[in-house]
Image (spheres, rainbow, N blue to C red):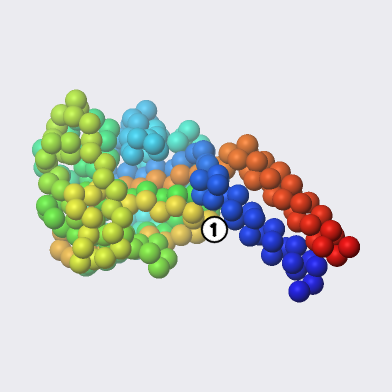
Amino acid sequence: MKPSSLIASRFFFIASLLVTALGGLPRSSYGSSIGVNFGATSFGTLTSSDVAGLPAFAQANYNNVSAAATGLSLVDDAGLATGVTLTTTGANSFSVFTGNPVSGPDEILYNTRANSTGTSWSFTLSGITYANYAIIVYDLQFATGAVIGVGIGGTTYYSSSPAYNGPGYIDNNAATPFTYTQATSIDPLNPTPLSDYVLFTGLSGSSVTVNITGGANATRISGFQIVQIVPEPSTWAMLSLGGIAMLVGVRRSYRNAQT
């Protein structure tokens, strides 16, 4: 093996050990986010000051979408234009849970949703400028136990809905914290029970399509968020400095071995 190849192979091996020692991928913080609420025109729209969503990613300034969209421009959590556009394909019906009006922004986020006349539909986001991002899709269903698949690329997660009007969901009680349960199953025959959202991380690229699949009354989603992922500079600095130090050590070891 050439000296340069030997050094490189040792460096990448040691660097991988360093990453593992740091607890996996470098820690991250969250930057801007873009939220979409599929809300009907009479019920289920969020005001610009309403803060809703999974607690770690909760935001204001949701984009309320009440009809099929083609190239719809979206704003971020600060209400600023982003250049990101939304296009829905096959989503031609917007329905509302019973018991309106509901209480609390989280319940409103889940209260209305887009669905299709068939068993699948999709939406595409274009013009994304985030280098790294996550997408959260909220998918509480009308029918208890209804199974829905939410997919990006070759990965689809399957959830099995709790009772939408049960405690912690659409119960018209602002004092009841909304229950968020992540769907992590990739098996349509064994969906994650009582789950109401999916999370995709490690995404990049300026365009992404999200596919929604399911049976009757199980192709609805309430909304979604695109969340910018920003690695913490201190963690990257630690990784870089540690890697350089190890590379120097490997180089010295090789020279000593040669002499």
Left or right: 167 in relation to 211: left
Residue at 23%, 55% in the rendered image: 192
- The image shows a total of numbered marks equal to 1
Position of residue 69 measured from the top left corner of the image (x, y, whole percent): 37, 55
For the residue pair 221 and 29, the one nearer the viewer reads as 29
Farthest-out residue, top: 175
In what element is the residue under mark 1? loop
For the residue pair 37 and 203, the one nearer the viewer reads as 203
Mark 1 burial class by Cα count in 10 Å: few <14, some 14-19, many 20+: few
Position of residue 164 measured from the top left corner of the image (x, y, whole percent): 14, 45
Q: Quadrant of residue 57?
A: top left
Residue at 40%, 62% in the rendered image: 152
Taking the image as drawn, is residue 108 in sight? no
Farthest-out residue, right: 259
Farthest-out residue, bottom: 1
Residue at 64%, 54% in the rendered image: 15
Up the image or down, 169 lies above or below 213; here it is above
Q: Quadrant of the C terminus?
A: bottom right
Left or right: 254 in relation to 149: right
Position of residue 202 measured from the top left corner of the image (x, y, whole percent): 49, 54
Position of residue 148 measured from the top left corner of the image (x, y, whole percent): 23, 59
Taking the image as drawn, is residue 62 in sight? yes
Up the image or down, 44 lies above or below 252; here it is above
Q: Quadrant of the N terminus?
A: bottom right
Task: Tell me the kind of residue under disc 1.
Answer: Gly
Q: Please give the residue where the numbered disc 1 appears in the rendered image.
A: 205
Left or right: 209 in relation to 95: right
Residue at 32%, 44% in the rendered image: 37
